[in-house]
Image: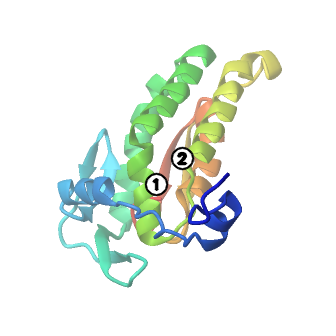
Amino acid sequence: MADSTNKTVYEIFQSMEQGPPAATSTATAQAWLDHHSCSFGFFMDGKFVRPENRQNLSLADSKGGVLCTTVCAEDSDISQCASSAATGYTSWSNLTCSQRSKVLLRLVSVLGLHGQCLSELCALCETTCSPSALVRLLQYYSSWAQLRDTLIPSWTPVGVVVVVSSDDCSLYSLMLKVLPALAMGKTHTSVSQIAFLF
């Protein structure tokens, strides 16, 4: 017979208090931002470029504090970015459909390596950007790249696609614009008032 001091399972569940919410850490994202001195330029020719004497824009975190700053693009920056994309177009458009598909799928593994940092950056700014949604998007458009010659045999890439977007464009929205062009064999250049973190 059960002792009267022992509580039943039902009584235990009725008296349970909710524990504190799980603490979310942004240490990985903060370390990445610190590594870049919380200051971003443009990413061209495989490196960050930060032109002098440019207007800066601040990106605020969810509490209103400055998370990082980024350079605003001017006409000369846009020209340099387009020139860089034109240079990349030659090698990108010469890849086979299968090779382009494999490159896009490699981005999936890179995103897997850095998904935690991306999630934390999104948490800092209270934006919605799921690494798993980006993975699905990359997988979808890599299949476009793989099947392009089968479905559209007469397709020939024409050149560079310039994507102009607002400063509040999300990474997901940007990828929706850029990935179809990359899958079809075009290079791209993205122009915005701020660098894309999300």
Residue 147 place in picture, x, y as percent: 73, 20
Horizontal arrangement in the rendering, residue 140 relative to residue 5 (left or right): right
Q: Nearer the viewer, residue 43 or 115?
A: 115
Q: Residue furthest front?
A: 1
What whole-number distance in Å separates the C-alpha atoms at marks 2 and 1?
A: 7 Å
Dot 2 and dot 1 residues touching (CB under 8 Å) = yes
Q: Nearer the viewer, residue 79 or 117?
A: 117
- Categorize mark 2 by other alpha carbons within 10 Å: few (<14), some (14-19), many (20+): many
Q: Point out which mark residue 119 bears.
A: 1
Horizontal arrangement in the rendering, residue 144 relative to residue 17 (left or right): right
Q: Closer to the N terminus: mark 2 or mark 1? A: 1
Q: How many marks?
A: 2
Q: Nearer the viewer, residue 57 or 2?
A: 2
Q: Point out which mark residue 131 bears.
A: 2
Q: Which residue shows up at 23% across the image and 55% down it?
A: 31
Q: Which residue shows up at 60% across the image and 41% down it?
A: 179
Does residue 36 show up?
Answer: yes
